[in-house]
Image: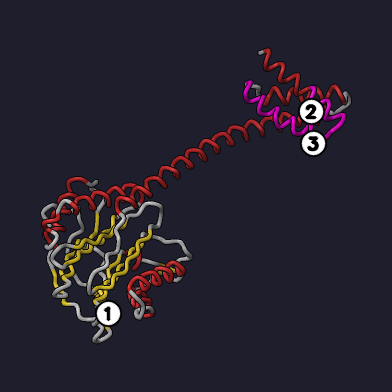
Amino acid sequence: MEEQQAILNKYEELLLRYMQNSNEQLLYRGQKFSRQSIENDVTPEEIVSIHKSVLHKLYPDIPDKILDSFDLLLEVMIGYGLLYREHQILRNQQQEIKSEMEIAANVQHTLLGSEVPSVKGLDIGAITVPARQMNGDYFQFVEDDNGCVSVAVADVIGKGMPAALCMSMIKYAMDSLPESRNNPGFVLENLNRVVEQNVDSTMFITMFYGIYNTETHEFYFSSAGHEPGFFYSSMDETFYDIETTGLVLGVDRYAKYKEYRKTIAENDLIILLSDGVTESRSQEGFIERQGIIRLIEQYIHLPAQQIVDNVYKELEKIQDFELKDDFTLIILRRKGL
């Protein structure tokens, strides 16, 4: 109590001096006084009370209405103080969450990061960009000793941390099945059982898995409800949808996945993507699949990596540089002689 009274006496002295000779030095002392008041639990009511008494002492004839107006100021400042403290607490909490998310995003990038391989006879380009800090899309390339390269593209139906954790599970489940990589349907069947047993029933995963044989130039693939990509035939300069059937992962543990095969000619393209590409939308609405094709055609003369980079930039621009969903685009081109 004595410390509080000393603080109040100090304010009275400060106010008297300021009323007699106002200057910036006294204003600065007023700022320091605020901190001392908080540290000594001096309430706003007590400060306003001292303020009123000092004014009455200096100006005995001051109207009561003027003094009463400080009661209104007191109520405003009490409410302001409470809300300001809540705002600061929320702001600090948001900053902590943001820092944790940045750490988690860096860990995810380290765990799930997949390098684009240099493969004989293939020109490969790939890009994946999260709509938020955490990425619900995932792609992976794996080369084997038999002249084959496998490519996986997955998309969690969901966003944020749960989606990122699912992607980590998928990645390590795939790493545990090296002996079955040459059978796309079998890979998806195994992953489907993992997802069905370990992922919340409200969360599903779509996935495309393919294997390119660089000796025979045949592409074997299966799909678990994933966004259909495109084949580009250089002979007739036409794009075709990659037509597949297959249930999304996690719905039915006994689901089977059909395997398809496609022979790839020189300069043909295999185009794989997530729905963040086909569901890009401008102010006029969604970008049609034909619009994606036109963008690829615009840059088809470039190396594969430059094609995917340029298509991404164009679609990002259309969306005012704010992605609505995670974006993944992969292009494999069989090199000509």
Give the numbered dot on residue 239.
1
Query: Which residue: 84% across, 33% down?
Result: 22
Tag 1 and tag 3, C-beta contact below 8 Å: no
Check if residue 336 falls in the magenta segment.
no
Q: CA distance from mark 2 to mark 1?
A: 81 Å
Query: Which residue: 35% across, 64% down?
Result: 127
Q: CA distance from mark 3 to mark 2?
A: 25 Å
- The residue singled out by tag 2 in the image is 67
Evaluate whether residue 207 shows in this view: yes
Element class at badge 1: strand
Q: Position of residue 243 (x, y in %)?
A: 20, 72
Evaluate whether residue 245 shows in this view: no
Q: Which mark sits nearer the N-terminus, 2 or 1? A: 2
- The residue singled out by tag 3 in the image is 24
- Return the residue nearer the eye: 331 or 227: 331
Q: Which mark sits nearer the N-terminus, 3 or 2? A: 3
Mark nearest the camera among 2 and 1 is 1
Mark nearest the camera among 1 and 3 is 3
Residue 159, above or below 82: below
The amino acid type, in three-letter code, at marker 2 is: Leu
- Judged by its main secondary structure, the magenta piece is helix
The amino acid type, in three-letter code, at marker 3 is: Glu
Residue 302, above or below 197: below
The amino acid type, in three-letter code, at marker 1 is: Phe
Q: CA distance from mark 1 to mark 3?
A: 74 Å
Q: Is residue 164 left or right of residue 79?
A: left
Give the numbered dot on residue 123.
none
Task: Tell me the quadrant of the picture where the N terminus can be found.
Answer: top right
- Return the residue nearer the eye: 12 or 57: 12
Q: Which mark sits nearer the N-terminus, 1 or 3? A: 3
Residue 275, above or below 10: below
Magenta stretch: give its range.
Answer: 13-40
